[in-house]
Image (tube, rainbow, N blue to C red):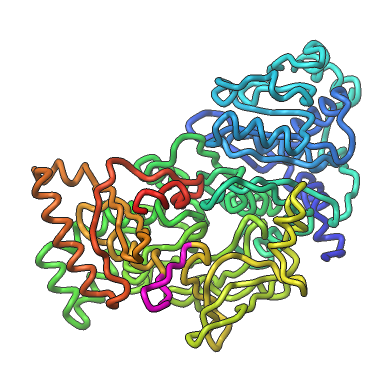
């Protein structure tokens, strides 16, 4: 465990608020609302008063659910610096799932956006003392007297406590050991019901430490924060690392479409960009593919030396589209399409891939672009923080990825059986991912243990690799490869109906095209990986907030 005072999680933010008091900290994108570190610290102090008035004690749980905004940030930091345990709930969770998490975690307070409270049956969360709006702090009356916790009452208490105002010198948070629980983060999961990850402050501090020591974040750095803050990836770097360093984050609470994001990148000019693959793949498909498919460009890309000129122009265009001032784009949360990654690598676009999981808050491996990141790899284990090895590798060196180190969880909340199954007897955390390490220690992910399929003679089939080939075909939005009981493979394909309609293609022509696509993809696959049929699916597959398909919802569709 990290015992140095500079890595004490609570004290990192005490120092940051004091040192960066007048710098901008958070902006709600699309509004005129920007809070300096000082103003954010004042909001946190007011929330501490609210917690005390509500009877909240050390280690009580406080749940927060809503879109990215400055109030969400304040609640998260206020809970942890007060000594409570934060329970972030993804805003995309349905009301019944959120209610289960609130009750299962034993949360005493709930901060929730007005849109999320719609459909909530508050009688189903009887142990919650009060619910408070993330929009404007108005109380949603439960068992507490709302007059005691409304904004005016808290403001009055604040003035009584700080008659001369609240300044940088007044910021003081009680020291809290890093072995204390900081959060219980419920996984979105692609294979079933979510579990509550018990994350000590040490795990959160390990991720922030890497962000600071790597130089990825620094005072004055700029972030466009569009990943959900309730998810470990966005929380660790867009939020926690940024504010520990004195950076400035613009919080996007709307659905992050490429159009919205490109506008924000152009305006804000971020210094670092964190994204999930889906966003980058969409921008690549809309901006780059139409260019490189044109006859002159496609021809020049095959000519040595001339191709470097074209690649340079495409790279510069793409860099400017992302604001032009970022050091690199970091991709995580799901596998990046190999074709997209290969082309970005060819044009020397500053992009690298990391690997992690909620159970590690989340980072396990990463190598920055300017430090030798490798094609198709997700980097090396974080030096001095995380270790990785391959459990029971096959003849190709592929086995389950296991890890241990500063960032790992202590277990699943109220779920000793799942905790026991997640750790090896000697204390390594089982990731559930299949991967291999090269001779230099770079990790390559091959797929999920639970999604790996067996061919007719016991061959290992990684459906994600086949899906990547299908997704590269024109008129394909996304796909899912499943296995029938007779071991034959079936691909569910959601067409890109916008492209289909623009082409004037009929349903019959679309079916014929998909059959040709099946044959073309099969020509690139081994005999045991062949797709027997493509079935059209009418709409996008249901996904987790990090945009991974919830495979478990579709496994019975081809039985």
Nearest the camera: 30 or 54?
Answer: 54
User: Quick check: 247 left or right of 535?
Assistant: right
In the image, residue 437 above or below residue 329: below
Q: Quadrant of residue 146?
A: top right
Is 124 contained in the magenta span?
Answer: no
Residue 147's x, y, as percent? Answer: 80, 11
In the image, residue 445 above or below residue 554: below
User: Quick check: 128 left or right of 175?
Assistant: left
Residue 3's x, y, as percent? Answer: 87, 64
User: Quick check: 305 left or right of 87?
Assistant: left
Residue at the spot x=45%, y=52% of the render?
551
Quadrant of the drawing holding the N terminus: bottom right
Residue at the spot x=88%, y=54% of the render?
177
Q: Quadrant of residue 417?
A: bottom right
**Residue at the front extreme?**
486
First to last magenta residue range: 451-461
């Amino acid at each position: 465990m990290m015992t140095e005072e500079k890595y004490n999680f609570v004290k990192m933010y005490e120092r940051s608020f004091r040192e960066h008091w007048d710098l901008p900290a958070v902006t709600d994108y699309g509004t005129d609302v920007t809070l300096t570190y000082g103003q954010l610290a004042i909001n946190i102090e007011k929330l501490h008063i609210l917690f005390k008035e509500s009877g909240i004690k050390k280690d009580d749980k406080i749940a927060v659910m809503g879109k990215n905004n400055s109030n969400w940030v304040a609640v998260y930091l206020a809970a942890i610096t007060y000594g409570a345990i934060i329970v972030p709930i993804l805003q995309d969770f349905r009301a019944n799932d959120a209610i289960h998490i609130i009750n299962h975690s034993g949360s005493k307070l709930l901060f929730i956006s007005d849109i999320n409270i719609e459909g909530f049956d508050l009688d189903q969360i009887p142990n919650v003392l009060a619910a408070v709006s993330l929009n404007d702090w108005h109380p949603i009356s439960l068992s507490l007297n709302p007059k005691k916790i409304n904004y005016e009452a808290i403001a009055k208490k604040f003035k009584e406590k700080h008659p001369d105002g609240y300044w940088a010198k007044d910021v003081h948070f009680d020291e809290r050991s890093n072995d204390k629980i900081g959060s219980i983060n419920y996984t979105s999961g692609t294979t079933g019901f979510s579990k509550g990850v018990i994350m000590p402050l040490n795990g959160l501090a390990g991720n922030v430490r890497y962000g600071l020591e790597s130089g990825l974040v620094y005072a004055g750095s700029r972030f466009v924060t569009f990943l959900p803050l309730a998810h470990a990836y966005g929380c660790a770097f867009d939020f926690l690392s940024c504010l520990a360093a004195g950076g400035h984050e613009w919080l996007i609470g709307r659905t992050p479409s490429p159009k919205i994001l490109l506008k924000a990148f152009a305006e804000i000019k971020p210094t670092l960009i964190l994204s999930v693959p889906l966003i980058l793949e969409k921008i690549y498909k809309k901006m780059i593919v139409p260019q490189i498919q044109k006859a002159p460009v496609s021809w020049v890309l095959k000519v040595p030396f001339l191709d470097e000129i074209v690649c340079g122009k495409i790279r510069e265009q793409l860099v400017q589209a992302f604001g032009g001032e970022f050091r690199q784009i970091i991709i995580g949360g799901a596998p990046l399409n190999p074709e997209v990654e290969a082309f970005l690598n060819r044009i020397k676009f500053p992009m690298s891939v990391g690997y992690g999981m909620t159970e590690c808050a989340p980072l396990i491996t990463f190598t920055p672009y300017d430090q030798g990141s490798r094609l198709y790899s997700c980097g090396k284990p974080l030096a001095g923080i995380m270790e990785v090895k391959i459990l029971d590798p096959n003849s190709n060196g592929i086995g389950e990825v296991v890890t241990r180190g500063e960032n790992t969880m202590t277990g699943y909340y109220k779920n000793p059986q799942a905790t026991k199954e997640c750790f090896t007897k000697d204390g390594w955390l089982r990731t559930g991912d299949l991967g291999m390490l090269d001779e230099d220690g770079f990790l390559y992910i091959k797929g999920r243990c639970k999604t790996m399929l067996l061919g007719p003679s016991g061959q290992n089939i990684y459906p994600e690799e086949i899906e990547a080939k299908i997704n590269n075909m024109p008129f394909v939005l996304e796909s899912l490869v499943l296995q029938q009981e007779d071991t034959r493979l079936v691909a569910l394909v959601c067409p890109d109906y916008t492209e289909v309609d623009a082409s004037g293609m009929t349903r019959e022509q679309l079916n014929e095209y998909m059959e040709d696509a099946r044959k073309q993809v099969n020509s690139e696959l081994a005999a045991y990986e062949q797709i027997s049929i493509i079935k059209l699916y009418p709409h996008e597959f249901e996904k987790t907030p990090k945009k991974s398909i919830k495979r478990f919802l579709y496994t019975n569709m081809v039985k």
